[in-house]
Image (cartoon, rainbow, N blue to C red):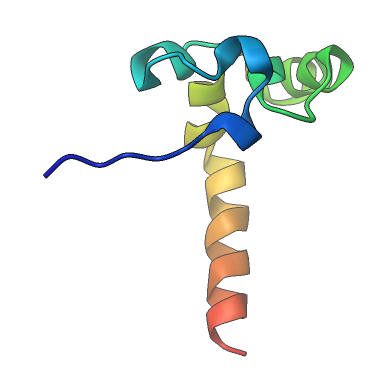
Amino acid sequence: MAVTADLAKLLDKEYENKSLADLIKAPVSALSGVSEGDARLLKEAFHINTIGDLGRNKFFRAATAIADLADSAK
């Protein structure tokens, strides 16, 4: 089954037409609203360099899971 998603609102313009394989290798600053300074802080604090690193980070995954559980308990 093919899955499609419009990621344009989540990405800076230059990354809108990239493949998922390219996006996971893209810098965190490719995400709309994440500045170069923000990306630098993520790198320093959590060794996060790419969108893939951010999405796979155990701390961010744990926080997302907790938030999702809390939301579903409402």
Quarter of the image where one finds residue 49: top right
Q: Residue furthest right?
A: 37
Towards the viewer: 19 or 64: 19
- Residue 25, x across and y down, in percent: 47, 11
Answer with left or right where residue 65 lies relative to residue 44: left
The N terminus lies in which quarter of the figure? top left
State which quarter of the image contains the C terminus.
Answer: bottom right
Q: Residue at x 56, y 87 (%)?
A: 73
Q: Residue furthest left?
A: 1
Looking at the image, residue 64 sits to the left or right of residue 4; the answer is: right
Residue occupying image coordinates x 60% and y 44%: 59
Q: Is residue 1 found left or right of 22 in the rendered image?
A: left
Q: Residue furthest bottom?
A: 74
Q: Is residue 47 visible?
A: no
Q: Is residue 13 above or below residue 69?
A: above
| Vertical placement of residue 66 versus 24, above or below | below
Taking the image as drawn, is residue 71 in sight? yes
In the image, residue 17 lies at what x, y percent?
Answer: 47, 16
Number of numbered callouts drawn: 0
**Residue 3, image x, y percentages:** 25, 42
Question: What x and y, as percent, mark residue 16?
Answer: 54, 19
Residue 18, by quadrant, is top left
Quarter of the figure with residue 44: top right
Q: Residue at x 78, y 26 (%)?
A: 34
Q: Residue at x 64, y 36 (%)?
A: 9
